[in-house]
Structure formats: structure tokens, C-alpha cells
Image: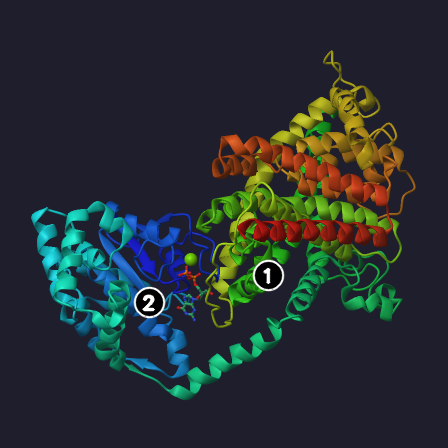
Amino acid sequence: MLTFALVGNPNAGKTTLFNALTGSTAHVGNWPGVTVDKRVGTYKKSDEPIDIVDLPGIYSLSPYTPEEVIARNFILDERPDCLINIIDATNLERNLYLTTQLMELDVPMVVALNMTDALDKRGDHIDVKALEKRIGFPVAEISALKGDNIDGLMTRAMEALKTPRKAFSVLKESALGSAISNAEIALKLKEVEAPLFHAVKLVEKDSIEVETHPAEARAAEAFIKENLINDQFNGDTEAAIADARYKYITKYFSSTLTRARKYGYDELSKSDKADKVLTHKWAGIPIFLMIMFAIFHMTFSENFLYLGSIIPSFGEWCAVEGGAAKTIFFATGLNSPGIIFFNAMELLTGSIGEGLAAGLEGLGTNPILLSLLIDGAWGGIASVLSFLPQILVLFLFFSILEDTGYMARVAFMLDRIFRRFGVSGRAFMPMIMGFGCSVPAMINTRTMADEKERQATVRVIPFFSCGAKLPILLAISGAIATRVDGLNADLITYGMYLLGIVVALISLLMMRTTTQRGEASPFIMELPAYHMPGFRNLMLHLWDKAKHFIEKAFTIILISCIAIWFLSNFGWSWNYVGEEGMDQSILASIGKLIQPIFTPLGFGSQLNENGWVFAVAAILGLIAKEDVIAAFGALAACIGGTLANGMEEGVAEVVLMMNATGISNAALVSFIAFNMLTIPCFAAVATARGEIGKEKFKWTLLFWVVVSYLVSTIVYTVGVAVWMIAIWAAAAVFVAVGIALYNRYMDKKERK
Ligand code: GDP
Ligand code: MG
């Protein structure tokens, strides 16, 4: 099978093109570094299918960053059949810098001139025919975002395969040309593959190359010295080569671009103007926090825009009391979009459940089997599925922030603050990815240069509440909101997300000043201009999330629910105990056994005879975090139904069940905190083990247990008093910063 590789600068549109070619749903982001793990897909529209590899974004083929090494090794060692060099047409000269290096290989190659839609919008024009002639291989104009000419690009690539290409260096006409030619001849004699490429690297004194061919490297150096070439760069051949490349680009390629100056300038200044406010020195972070709150409000509030407080009788005023419309749209006020979708989904899963139950009863199904199917299996799945719409709404907002380029700014702002404490902005990108799923986020840390910083980052990634933890947050904050007047779920979820972030940052600072000591690694990032996110990319991203979630619901969660049903309906001697005797069930006795562990956290022995469900749910969360709520869903019919008679209509079953355990609000918050911070799901644990290494992983497990236990205990102890939590958080920050500063100070002293 043929293999084509996508090579280009960060943000040139590789991932977008990759998705367009393979129809796959790889993650598309806006910051350099998202594409670290190697992704392979298949292009199927040609006669034979072609493997497409999305390489990490790079500016050059030197071995300074992990991305460069990955891309370089892939191209040199795996020898793809064709390189697709993707170029951002709105940044032609800078992007061609990499192209001049790729030319030095003899691999067939095409240039995909991307973002031509944006170029047209600016009114700029590139003379593609002329460019093609001067570059020496095919150039195809495309728009990866709009899907323009993607198949045309592939046709050109297939043509390029058939006509062998000779390696060519733009440096041959520079002062170093003769040195390169000499080295090339020496390497040819040694029968090295791609001699021209390696010759240039030798002259450049590239560390990898000098190590592999020490004799030739010395010869090249001697030659350069003898001939006194390259004097103005004081022997810095690397700088001389970079300079020669740019000179060549300006001389031969730049003229193919005609600019309509005005447009380009306007666009740039618009982005700059936005950045004046959005990345402002001290207003930037508060603005970010406000944007985040607005997102949570839109997703989780039952009092959208606080209309319910402004117009108190809003609900009655707008809808017939008790109708489906009221259930969906109005609570204390108008519901936010997220809640509207949630209610609609709940209505749907509810009626499916009722329909199923009625149908099965009509068939004369055995009541025990009925209980298994309806309460156990469907009840658990439905309680998780109801949250899917809200998860998608939240991720839609997150993806928009990412795709517009705003998240890159957040990393940049945080870098400014945390660099002092040995934590770089590099660490924030994977952490923010952790809001989606810890697994790819942990893998993404591979771009980080400092190993200790990387390990510390992997450890705190689970604190960034992932999609699977959202149902826990939503169900429980919903329960709290029904109990406390005037409190809304948006505020609780927002608070819990912030708690996760604060705990992560404090832990990171503490680790970086103790066991994981080190200087922050350099963080060079270009802030891309803001742009509108592509609709297709957003939808692909959401579809990916939804698919993953539904797959999980009908596999691992379904199996867990069935297991929970058996364990909660049967006693130790495999006697059926049913709803009334659930207290005697296997699950109940296990739950009661481990329950005391959670007493300091508020959901242990102090609860009534149904309280064991929390202990059980917390343990089940180790399999998959959705299992926590699925377990509640599977058990709710029994526990809530029998004990909470006369509860207000319309309150979800899960809420009834929680109320039936006699748990306090503080303990509910503590329960969320515990599940958010403790050992993550199986998949994340396995990934972390791979990324951190066996030895240190033991400590990582202990770290997660200790942090979650400690923080939850604190949350519970300070109780419902929100201001007390704030004081504790402030005190913890204070201590952490104190330790950090003290250690820095001692460090400096030592050095002196
Ligand atoms: P990568 O870093 O090379 O993988 O680049 P991405 O595929 O993540 O693209 C970076 C940004 O450029 C994304 O926000 C894309 O939506 C945007 N983008 C990609 N291709 C095009 C295009 O053809 N036209 C326009 N206007 N934007 C594009
Ligand atoms: Mg990418």
C-alpha cells in the first residue's frame, strides 16, 4: 500500500486536510503541538487505497524539538512514497522555508497550497504556474477547510510518484555551495541514502549528523575554515544557511505573490486589537474566567440570563402549566440551551423506558427479568445518556474557543504567570485538552522537553474534569440546586471545574519545587490570527465525542449496570432479595464494609441504611466515570421510589435516591470532588502508567488517592459555607506559593 505523509508548519492545516482526505475525526486544534501522536488514515477515492500520515507541525528539519525529530525520522527512515508539503498561502515565505529543506530529499513531493480561500478574501494572488516552475514540482491550490480541490491534489501527487525527482538544494548557489558539494561527494562514496540532505546537515553542524559521520564533519569544517567562506557569520554555518534560504526565497519565490496590502493589514490589526483586550496583562485572566462562566451558564442554568429573577412568573406566563413545553423550557426561569436539550433527551429516554416496560409486561415477562431489563440495564444507560446533549453543548463551546485561537492565548497568558514557578505554558495545552479526555491529553505531553515537568503534568491532567465526569457533576449539582433555594447548577459546576484547576495548579507548583524540580522549559509559540472556526470541523469533533459516549454507554456501562443489578438484587447465597430486601444484597454488604473509609469525606457511615450506594458508586467509578451515575440510575428505581414518596413531581429519580440516603449538601460536593480528583478511569490509568513509567507510577496512584481524599475531606469539613472553602483555597495557595518562593530563594543562595 502507498503511504503519503503530510508535512508542514504548525497551523498550516495538516489536520484539517487529513480529515478531509480520510474522513476521519482526528482532533483539530489551533495551537502548534496538538498533532503529536502519529495519526494514520486511509484515502479511498483512488484506484488503490492510500495511507495518509499526519506528521507533527514543524518549522524546520533540525533536531531541536520532539516534533522535528519525529517528522524527520519518519521521512528519512520510513520513506513515505510521497510527501504532501502543506503550505499556508497567507504566510507564503515563512512556510517555504521548510519547503527548501524538503527539496533536498529525493522523495516525490507535491505542495498543497492551502488556505487559498483566506488568500482570495484578502485579495492577494499567487501565480501558481510560476511558483511551480521555480520550485520544480507540482503545486496544487486547495482549501482544506472548504474541501476545495482535495482530489485534484491527490491526482497531482499520483503524477509526482511516476516522475522521479532529483534532490535539489537552494544553497548550491550560496557561499557554502562548494562545501556542501564536497560533503555530498564524500557521503555518496559511503553510499549514504539522501546524500544531499545529509551533506547540508553536516555543513550546518547538525548534532545528529555530526555524530553519525564524524570524519566527513571534520572534513567539511576544515574546508570551510580553509576557504574562509562564511566569514560574516563568524563560523556559525547554521545561521549562514538559514540566511541563504531566506535570500533564495525572497529572490525567486516572493515575486509570485501579489498583495492587496490593505486587506492583509486590516485583518492583522483586527486580531491585534482583540488581543489588546483579551490578553491584557491583568484583565486577561478575569476575562477568561468570565467567558468560562458564560459557557457554563449557557450549558447548565435553569435561569437563563437570570430572566426568572427579572420576571418571576416567567414559567406560568409563557406555557400551560404542566405541559411538556413547560417541562422542557421553563424551570425557575427560561432554561439555558443545554438544559433544554437535556430535558428533551430525558423525556425521550423516559418514554422509551416506559414503552419498553409496557411492551415487555404485555408479553408477560417475568417480573425479575423485567426489573433487570428496565431498572437495571435501561435505567443505568438512560441516566448516563440524558447528559449527552449537555456534554455536546459544553464541548461545542470549548471547541469554538480552541478553533478560534483563543485557547492558545490562554496558554500564553498562563505561561507569563507560572513560568516563575517552573511551570511553562507548554504544560497548559495538554491540561486544557484534559477537559475532553485525559487519554489524548496525557499523550500530548510528549511535546514537553523537560521530563520532570512532563511527569508532573501527566499526574494533574485527571484533575481537569473530563467529559465522563460531567454526568456526576450535573446529576449531583442538580440535586443540590433542588435543595438550596436560589442556587443554580451552573454555579456549582463552574465552581467544581475551578476547584479541579486550582488543585492541579497547586499540586503542580508543589511538585515542581520538590520531587519534580526544574526550570520551566522554553515555550515559543506563535499566536495565530483569530479566525472563524470551521463548521465541518466542529461537527466532526462533536460527532466523535457523541459516538465515543454512546459506544461506551452500550458496552462497558451496560455490562456494569447488569452486574450492579445482579449484585444488588441477590444475596450471598444467590437468593433473590429484590427491592425490599436490597439491604441484604451482595452489593449492599460490600458497600457497608467499605463505607467507613468515606466517613471523613461525608458520604460514609453517617448516612442512613441506603448510604452504601455512594461508597459503591465511588469504587465503580474506577472502571469508567460514567458508571458512578449509571449505578445511581440502576439503583434509583428501588431506593428512591420506595423511600421518597410525596417528593415534588418532576425531580429526577436519581435525585430522589440521593435524598433517600440522608446525605448533606456538603457531602454531595465532597463526593463530586472525590470522584473528580481520585484515580481516573482504567484507560487513563493505563495511559499514565505508559507515560510516566512503572517506577514512578506507584507514587502517582498514591498521589491521586491522597489528593482526592484530602481535598474532599476539606470540602466536607468546611461544609456548605462557601466562603470557608474560599479561605481554605486561599490558604493553600498561600502556603504553596510560600514554599515555591522559599525554594527558589534557597536555590539562588546555593548557586552563589
Ligand atoms: P495543523 O496544525 O497543521 O494541523 O492545522 P489545523 O488543521 O489544526 O488548522 C489550523 C487552523 O486553520 C484551523 O482553525 C483550521 O480551521 C484552519 N484552516 C485549515 N485549513 C484552512 C483553509 O483551507 N482555509 C481557512 N480559512 N482556514 C483553514
Ligand atoms: Mg494538527
- In this image, 163 relative to 680: left or right? left
Is the CB of the residue bearing disc 1 within 8 angstroms of ligand 1?
A: no
Percent from the top left, x then y, of residue 644? 89, 37
Mark 2: few/some/many CA within 10 Å (<14, 14-19, 20+): many
Among the two numbered marks 1 and 2 on one chain, the one whose residue lies closer to the N terminus: 2
Residue at far front of view: 752
- In this image, 719 relative to 277: left or right? right
Residue nearest the viewer, comparing 265 with 382: 265
- In this image, 198 relative to 498: left or right? left
Please identify the quadrant where the N terminus is shown: top left
Mark 1: few/some/many CA within 10 Å (<14, 14-19, 20+): some
Percent from the top left, x then y, of residue 742? 66, 51
Residue denoted by label 2: 87
Is the CB of the residue bearing disc 2 within 8 angstroms of ligand 1?
A: no
Residue denoted by label 1: 414
Where is 262 relative to 144, above or below? Answer: below
Please name the amino acid that badge 2 sits on. Ile
Please name the amino acid that badge 1 sits on. Leu
In which quarter of the view is residue 338 placed? bottom right
Q: Secondary structure at mark 2?
A: strand
Residue at 35% from the left image edge and 82% from the top image edge: 124
Percent from the top left, x then y, of residue 173? 14, 71
Residue nearest the viewer, comparing 451 with 678: 451
Residue nearest the viewer, comparing 692 with 322: 692
Colouring scheme applied when the structure was drawn: rainbow
Residue at 74% from the left image edge and 21% from the top image edge: 590
Q: Secondary structure at mark 1?
A: helix
Query: Which circle marks residue 315 in the picture?
Result: none
